[in-house]
Structure formats: C-alpha cells, structure tokens
Image (tube, rainbow, N blue to C red):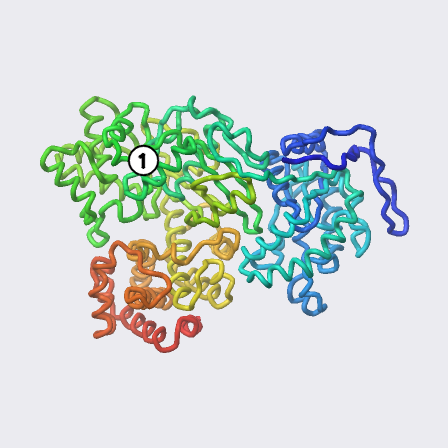
Amino acid sequence: MLEVAHPAISHPDVPHPPKEDHEAVLPTPPSSMPEDGMTIRALAERARELAADGRRRILGIAGPPGAGKSTVTAALLEALGDRAVVVGMDGFHLSNAELRRLGRRERKGAPDTFDVDGYVALLKRLSAQTEGTIHAPIFDRELEESIGSAVAVRADTPLVITEGNYLLLADHGWHEVRDLLDEVWYIDVDAETRRRRLVTRRLGHGHPLAEATAWVEHVDEPNASLVDATRERADLIVRIAEAPVATALGAHSLDDLPDTVARPSYDPDDVHCGIVHIGVGNFHRAHQAMFVDRLLNDGEREWGICGVGLLPHDAAMRDALSTQDGLYTLVTAATDGTESARVIGSLTRYLYAPDDPSAVLSALCDPRTRIVSLTITEGGYGIDETSGAFSPEDAATCADLDDAAHGRLQAPRSAVGYLVAALLRRREAGVAPFTVMSCDNIQGNGHTARTAVSGFADRIDPGLGAWIRSTVAFPNSMVDRITPVTTDETRANVVERFGIADRWPVRSEAFVQWVLEDDFPLGRPPFETVGVQLVDDVEPYELMKLRLLNASHQAMSYLGILAGATMVHEVCSDPLFIGFLRGYMHREAIPTLRPVPGIDLDDYCEQLLQRFGSTAVRDTLARQVVDGADRIQTFLLPVVREQLTAGGPIEHAALVLAAWSVFLERAGGGGMPVPVSDRRFEGLRAAIVAEAVKPGAFLDHSPVFGTLGADDRLRSAFIAARASLIADGARASIAAVG
C-alpha cells in the first residue's frame, strides 16, 4: 500500500519563492494535512485535481534508484489515460561515448552524467506549450542509450509527469528543475527493499550477480544518499510498504490486491459468453482476451469468452484458471523497462474438452455463441502447403475423420472436428452459424480456416461443405504481440513487483496490434472502440507482419543459437545481427510487400528492431524455433519464392535455411543446448541424412519446400551458405553476407 510519510502540500497556483544565487528554498508547508494510508487511487485523484482546469501542469515523481518511481508513474498513467503523458529525466542521459570521453562511464547515473541543461530547456518548453506537439527523448534500458523524439507531447494534454532521481537536487546544475515543477512527490522505500530491487534489475539486464551487486554498492548507493538528502523539498513524501505475503489471485481477493494493479470493473457472473475460443495459450491471454477485457470494462457484457482446451497439456490451464476463478495477471513491459499489471477476467468459463466433449459442443451450439476464435498454430489446420488442400496428418484430426466416416462424431478430438460437428448441429437445428475467427500467424488465416473446415465437412457430406463455404464467415486477421512462455521467473516477478500469487500469469511486451477483416454476419462487439483496426483487406498488414517480424524471428534464432546466444535481446543488441536483420528486411522482404495503408515500412522495421532488442520482455530463441518447419514454410519461403520469380536477392534467406539445416543436424544428434521441438522432425530426418551425402538434398524435402528446392539459384546459395557455416561459423557467415 501507499502511505503518506510527510504530508507537505503546495497548491499549484501558489508560486514557489524565488531563489537567489542558485540556493534552494524549501516550499512553505500548508496547514492542511492528508490522511495516512493514501492509495494510488487517491494519488490519481490528486493528479486529476492538479490539472483539473485544463492548464498545463508538470508533476514530478522523485526518489532514489529502486524506490518504485516507474511503478507509481505507470499506475498514474493507467488511471489518467490520455489526460497525462510521461517525460522521463532518464531521456537526458549522456551517451556512452560522451561519458567515456569525459571519464564518467563507470558511474553512469550520477548527477553529472545527464544533460541537465537540455532537460531544463525541455521543461520550460513544456510549461509554456500552448499549441502543436513537442517531442521528448526516452532512455532505452536495453540499449543503455537515449532515443530522441520518442515521446509526443500534445498541447491539449494537461498533465506532464516527469520522473527521475534528481528533480529536487539543488546543485550539480539541477537547481532550476524544482521551480519548473508544479508539484513533486518523493517516493520512499526501505533501503533493503530498494537494494534488492536494484540488484534484481541489473540481473534482469544480463549482468552477473557479483557485477550487479558491486554496481549497486558503488554507484547506486552513493546516488541514493544524495537523493535522500533532498526529500524535504518535496510537496508529498509517499512511502511504499511492501506486503509481507503475496495475495493469492481469485475473485474473493481482488479488493486486496495492490492499488498499482488494475482489475475488472465488472462482475464475471453478469457476463454472457458470446465467444468460444479454442486454444487458450499465453498469446490469446495477452492479446484477444485483453481486448475483450477492455470491452467488458466498457459495459459490453454479452461478449465474455468461454475457453476450450483440447490437448493434454491444457489440463494445467484448466487447473490454474479454476483455482483462480478464471482470473490471471497480464504484465506488460515497455522497451524502457516500465511494467504495468492488470488482472484479466474475460475468460469467464473454461472447458477442458477431454473431460466433457458434450459440454464443449453445447457451448459451440448455444445461439448466444456468435464467434468462435482460434489459436491452434499452423499445424492445427491440416493444410498441405504445396497443394493448399485439406490433408491432415495429425492423429486427432485423422481420428475425427474416421469417426465422421462411421457416423459417430459425438466426441471430437481436434479443433476442426469440433467446428464441423457444431456447425452441422446448428444447421440441423436451424440456428445461424457462428463466425470462425482465426488468430493464428498464417497468411490468409481466415481462408486457411475455411479450407480446413469445409474440407473436413466435404468428407462427411459435400452438401455440408458447400453450405459452410457459402454461409459461414471466416474473417482474416493480423495479430501481433511478443509473448514469451511463462516461467518460474515470471511468477516470481509478479509476486515481487505486484504482490500477486498467480499460478499462470502472462508477461508480454507493451506493444499490441490487431487488424481484423470486418465480416461478422451475426454481429460482433465494438472492437474498434478498444484499439482493434477494422479493415476491408487485411492482406497487406499480415504480409508485412509475417515476412518482417515472424521471418526475422527465424532469421535471428537459428543463427543466434549457432553463435551461442540464448535470448532474443542478446542477438538484437549485437550490431552484426542487427545489420543482418536490416539487410534481410530491406533487400529481400520489403520488395515482396504491397503498400500498407498508414504504415511507413522503414519506420516499422526500426520499431521491430527496438522491440526485439528490449530486455524487458526476455524472450528466448528456443521459443522461436518450436515447430520450425511450419514457421519457415509460412514466414520465410514465400519471400524466397517471390524473390526468385522476380530475380531479386536471396542471400540472407538462404543463410537462414542453411542455419536451420545445421541446427537440425546438430540438435537432432544432441549436440546443441537447444533441443529440436518440431512436430515434423521425423519427416526431416531423412533429408538431413541425405544432405551429408549430397549437398543441397535437404531442399528436396517436398513437404516443406515443394518444388522450390529444385531452383538452381537457391540451391547454389544454400550449399555455399551451409559450407560457410560449417567451416567458419555463424558470425563469419553473417559478416560475409553483409
């Protein structure tokens, strides 16, 4: 909770006394005293009052390193929405190169390692702003460098929140800052907690424990002592007291959660399920379920989600959600390391299909179910990539087809089997068909879903297949949010940072995008009111995402693993890899794309590199290579195919394919720290063995490459790239491509 430890308040309309000869003058404490136990809600209300008249106000959040300034700031921003914007002092760090020149690099973060004159100049501009937009820098914790013009401050935003260690400092050139701030809150915390946070933060940025501890002792602690001496210049001193025991998440404990955690404003018991979602994994919970949670908070109570799990490992999700009344914590991390947490309640029901297949069919057939959404991965649709026809190989779908052929599709096993069985029942009952909304990373995911569902139905009754093709809507979509797997570290972070004991929290990047084809005959929730982009044609957006973001993940991962890396941000802070990814994007991928409305592709690529390089998300290369055959086939090979047709360059893509083959060869034999996790690996084994005998034979594996592997130019580039990787290693091979 938050407690007021020193309640001196100054009214924003009362100017601070003038300063003479750069000496600090303490603000005069008013007579009114706030109550102890002030919460984030109360602080947010105080901030609202500060800017209630619409005039520009600047609120400073000060305190020593590790006090929790960013956490409080993020909570205020969450509460105030577009009435506030954050401009951090950290954006004025001197560059590492300049610090080295000045001999100050080893104490980065000290008062004289900032451009205080630039910070003061920006505060003056912000204070006087009456029109237009002012751009401010941010500090990227992963790069450990400032990025200019990264925050847009509009004149009509009444409150600017600026946070930093030295807002109250009266020397080292900082003496002008305090007078430019309408109010300053000093965030206090006990020293032990603060030091533990700082060590944990540096560990999270990849520093060894000994190095992290030494930095905190020799750099952060002297700065903290300096900052602590300025506390009496604040208008309000707020003490953050950590709860000794984390609160177990559940409907009964929502009111007990820290005020920094947002939570549902609705009662899940009042929500009806208008959506059934098959395949409730981390991505769905960080993406679609989050958007629906926003809708429910806005009063759209007809659109709750009934989640469905089909696979054996989904039993763990059943158990976690049932224990927590369907609730879970979503933590989002910005590129500067700022985190925010929200409890999501949109999964108002969860069905584990093997427990009760009839309950799943009942939910799908309920007339109130108007949308069935899917995240079942590329392999869940059973589409032959070469022919484009429905030709399933997975055991569950094949078993469902066998049952259907014998008239006994009463307990399906596969997603496609459930969809067809439910649509058949709805047709027989005279109930209009639901819309099937795929949210998988597949080009034309709606078209893919239609092919799979109607292809399955054709095996039962060609008339049913024709009815599905003519009557059921399958909108295409493009979805984007980097979402790693949940680990024990994720759970511990949720306990440490937010005081929540959550069996299966989700952590993702702050960036999120959903572009959706507007084709919902039975109606849809007002997605456009919560940040979803509704369009007539999704294809330009999905090609951009698949060929730039998803294909780049493949490009960095195999080469990164071969180079000895483990984390996405690790390779994407390496200039060699950054240059390689830029080369792939600009020379090979972008020439295959159509214009994307409203998107500058050069800017998009740079934004991707920033997202990839963020240490806040801590995504692994191993996650990117799961089911690599599907991903390579879907994300990278279309680029190769179009470039070969156009006579364009393919050197970057060929090196990625070669790296994939070397990875499979070495990892399949147990010679890599990352094991192969690919449902199609058994089919690839023969191609890997053949490659060792006949260079280029790997490309003859037609289930992945089709006829593409017969292209002489691709074959030559692949053979040369593979030889380079084996002889010279990944880094030299990347450098050779340029």
Q: From this viewpoint, is residue 361 visible?
A: yes
Q: In this view, does 635 lie to the left or right of 123?
A: left
The residue under label 1 is which amino acid type?
Answer: Val
Q: Between residues 658 and 223, which one lies in front from this camera angle?
A: 223
Q: Quadrant of the N terminus?
A: top right
Q: Which residue is more in the foreground, 274 or 500?
A: 500
In the rendered image, the residue lying farthest to the front is: 244
Q: Is residue 518 above or below residue 201?
A: above
For the residue pair 626 and 91, the one nearer the viewer reads as 626
Vertical relation: 660 (above or below) 380: below
Q: Which residue is drawn at 71% across and 45% down?
A: 62
Quarter of the view holding residue 45: top right
Q: Residue at x 73, y 46 (%)?
A: 125
Identify the residue position indicated by label 1 in the image: 308
Residue furthest right as drawn? 20
Q: Which of 490 and 715 is in front in this view?
A: 490
Task: Locate residue 64, reporting x and y percent.
Answer: 70, 49
Residue located farthest toward the bottom when viewing the structure as drawn: 727
Q: In this view, does 79 lie to the left or right of 580?
A: right
- Res 658 seen here: no
Q: How many labels does the image show?
A: 1
Quadrant of the rendered structure where residue 360 is? top left
Could you tell me residue 661's position as x and y percent?
Answer: 30, 66
Q: Taking 191 as reference, is 268 left or right?
A: left
Query: Measured from the top left, where is residue 393 in percent x and y?
Result: 19, 49
x and y percent of residue 276 in the render?
A: 33, 32
501 to 53, vertically: above or below: below
